[in-house]
Image (cartoon, rainbow, N blue to C red):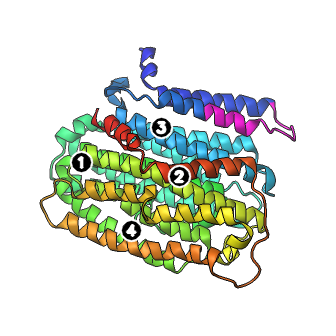
Amino acid sequence: MNYSQFLNMIPEATLMAILVIVFVADFCSHGKAERKWFNPFVCILLLAQLVINLCPATETVSLFGGIYHATPAASMMKSVLTFGTLVVVLQSRNWLTVTETKCEEGEFYMLTISTLLGMFMMMSAGSFLMFFLGLEMASVPMGCMVALDKFRKNSAEAAAKFILTATFSSGVMLYGISFLYGSTGTLYFSDFAYAITLSPMSIMGMIFFIAGLGFKISLVPFHFWTADTYQGAPTTVTGYLSVISKGAAAFTLVTLLYKVFFALSTFWIFAMYILVVLSITIANLMAIRQTELKRFMAFSSISQAGYIMLVAIGSSYIMSITALMYYVLIYIVANMAVFTIIASVENASGGKTDMATYNGLYKTNPKMAFLMTLALFSLGGIPPFAGMFSKFFVFLAAVDGRPSVMPYLVVFIALVNTVVSLYYYLLIVKAMYINNEGEPLATFKMDGNTKLTLAVCTAGVLFFGIASCVYDTLYSAAAM
């Protein structure tokens, strides 16, 4: 065996090294009441991994007989997800050390890193077998993360729903993969792209495969687990679910649609039209009815998933995958800013996450209310915040090179839904600045990690949109 192949797996190798280091550090310091160094230590390791991986490979490399493909685009997307995971870990310290869950820090860090490692393997898979193994490597630890609030029945219920739904979706996906193998006789993506035909078995296999990944991305009508799981899971884990796992699954699906299922594009583009319109429209309408913030953000994330998958209806893979990576990056900073504030308010209010808790927040915590407003404006796509630019590039990629009227119609529907999303995001702003019912939440101070997380996310919301080098770097990686 040629062990030098591992040198082309730098993201996975460095992440595996971090996992081992964190395990040893947790094991050697087990039982110590005060471990203030642990969170900064893990953050430094993830930051080092991010810096190492920021320079992607300059060409695609096939390893281990073709089951693993190292591509510049996948390497860049891994860097984006590592950045998001770093933000999650940075924000998690207050929950891990202050709340009554008594969750072991080491457990959370190892589960988070294990999940990220599975996503990395999934995105670089060169065969359906490796893809499925990576998907399960990510899904199983994620179910454990949802259940980390050990003394809250809602957390256990959310984990049960997540695991049962993940099991069902994996079964549907495996059923589709068996159809695809039966129609082509191969599981390797490179061979499959040439062997696939317009046979009914291939089409059904692709439909089942898309349905299975639709559960992971929370596309309508595969979204029913999302609101309950987001509400019951710890807020930090909810933030991780909403951005990191969704981004990895969306990147993988778009890549496979363009590079593996291209011969069936007539069928999957029509399916994407339906899924995108349903996801954006239904999620926005359901979000208007929510008064619990985590359920509110669950339907917001379903809508955002619809916007992300708009890139799948474009004709240019390079533009589509660049717009997807850029959208996920902007979504990470905006969404994690919101979830960081939700977690802070939840801790300060004794576990309350309903919208009424935010009534008059501007009077007692004006800085937090202001940062929440910036993040919500970015999620809604209000200029000049970064969310407006991310939506612009997604819309541009969706209609690029398509001569038919359907992509323009879908983008028009998405634009109309943007107005709807502005309405329900402004409901929170209205609660913080206008509503006067009840006593506002008392003034409270944020810990250092929370302040740093909000500073990083707010800087991203303000500057990622106007810093053209960010989009240019992602485009260069996608074009290699």
Kind of residue at disc 4: Ser
Real-space Cα separation, disc 1 to disc 4, in angstroms: 22 Å
- Reading the chain from its start, which is encountered first: label 1 or label 4? 1
Q: What residue is disc 3 on?
A: 79
Check disc 1 and give the amino acid type: Phe
Q: Is residue 464 left or right of residue 147?
A: left
Q: Which residue of the protein is positioned furthest toward the left in this rendering?
A: 403
Q: Quadrant of the C terminus?
A: top left
352 over 456 or under it: above or below: below
Q: Which of the 4 image quarters holds residue 203?
A: bottom left
Q: Residue at x 30, y 39 (%)?
A: 187
Task: Give the residues in magenta.
Answer: 29-46
Q: Amino acid at mark 3?
A: Ser
Q: In the rendered structure, are the residues bearing label 3 and label 4 in contact, judged by CB atoms less than 8 Å apart?
A: no
Q: For the N terminus, which image quadrant?
A: top left
Label 3 Cα crowd, 10 Å radius (few <14 / some 14-19 / many 20+): many
Residue 117 image position (x, y, % from top left): 52, 37
Identify the disc placed on residue 279.
4
Q: CA distance from mark 4 to mark 2?
A: 22 Å
352 drawn magenta: no
The answer to which quarter of the image holds residue 32 is top right
Q: Amino acid at mark 2?
A: Val
- In front of the other: label 1 or label 3? 3
Q: How far apart are the two marked residues, 2 and 3, measured between alpha carbons?
A: 14 Å
Which residue corresponds to the image point at 48% horizontal and 30% vertical from the top-left? 53
Q: Left or right? Give the position of 79 relative to 313.
A: right
Q: Is residue 225 visible?
A: no
